[in-house]
Image (tube, rainbow, N blue to C red):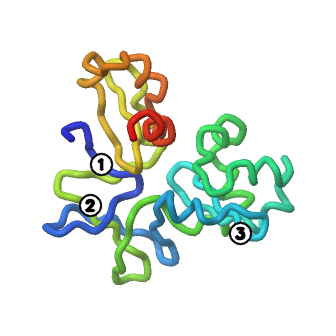
């Protein structure tokens, strides 16, 4: 539990109140479970770097074809997306596709939502997490929580490499397969 330092895009509203992260007007906070419900050609959402995109209308315009996006429908496509695209591609070609961020949300004045975080927690993007990829500074994401696992590496029963492989990345899928 000491490894949890924050949430991707925020977290569920917390009683006792931690920090609140304001979302821009018109944006909402979603969970990966919410995104996973949108997996068809007529209703396609993906996550890229902590942002939730409704790419349904963009599918037919995608230069790499619809299948390249549909393969990641309902999932976090950040790693693959970032290998192929420059950082400005979404604002440049599909700015209207961004509908929110990953993280729980609550209503706030000003039109956007506020994401309440537990005390002592911070909101991070996957880009923030991606800066922590070494044995001396290792962060991973598991089920929306950002974990600083640097001190745990040497204690991990499966060895350091099992975690370092996912340093700076979302390890939820693999973690959940191994740790039911």
Q: Tell me: 58 left or right of 107.
A: right
Residue 172, position in %: x, y?
46, 42
Helix, strand or loop at mark 2 = loop
**At 28% across and 66% down in the image, what residue appears?**
116
The residue mark sitting in front, 3 or 1, is 3
Q: Residues within 10 Å of mark 3 (few under 14, many from 20)?
A: some
Q: In front here: 44 or 84?
A: 44
Pointer 2 with pointer 1, Cβ within 8 A:
yes
Q: Which mark is residue 6?
A: 1
Q: Relative to residue 168, is residue 180 depicted above or below?
A: below
Q: How many marks?
A: 3
Q: Secondary structure at mark 3?
A: strand
Q: Which residue is mark 2?
A: 117
Whole-angstrom CA distance, mark 3 to mark 1, is: 30 Å
Distance from disc 2 to disc 1, alpha carbons, whole Å, reads: 8 Å
> Looking at the picture, does residue 5 appear above or below residue 54?
above
In which quadrant of the rendered image does the C terminus lie? Answer: top left
Mark 3 near mark 2, Cβ–Cβ under 8 Å?
no
Locate the N terminus and report the quarter of the image it occupies.
Answer: top left
Q: Which dot marks residue 43?
A: 3
């Amino acid at each position: 539990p000491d490894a949890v330092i924050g949430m991707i895009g925020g977290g569920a509203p917390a009683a006792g109140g931690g920090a609140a992260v304001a979302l821009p007007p018109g944006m909402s906070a979603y969970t990966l479970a919410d995104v996973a419900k949108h997996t068809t050609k007529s209703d396609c959402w993906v996550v890229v770097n902590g942002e939730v995109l409704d790419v349904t209308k963009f599918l037919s315009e995608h230069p790499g074809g619809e299948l390249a996006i549909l393969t990641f429908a309902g999932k976090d496509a950040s790693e693959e997306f970032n290998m192929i695209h420059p950082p400005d591609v979404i604002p440049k070609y599909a700015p209207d596709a961004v509908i929110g961020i990953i993280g729980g949300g609550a209503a706030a004045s000003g039109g956007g939502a506020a994401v309440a975080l537990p005390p002592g927690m911070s909101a991070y993007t996957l880009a923030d997490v991606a800066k922590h990829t070494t044995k001396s500074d290792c962060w991973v994401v598991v089920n929306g929580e950002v974990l600083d696992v640097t001190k745990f590496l040497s204690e991990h029963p499966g060895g350091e490499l099992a975690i370092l492989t996912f340093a700076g990345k979302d390890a939820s899928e693999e973690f959940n397969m191994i740790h039911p």
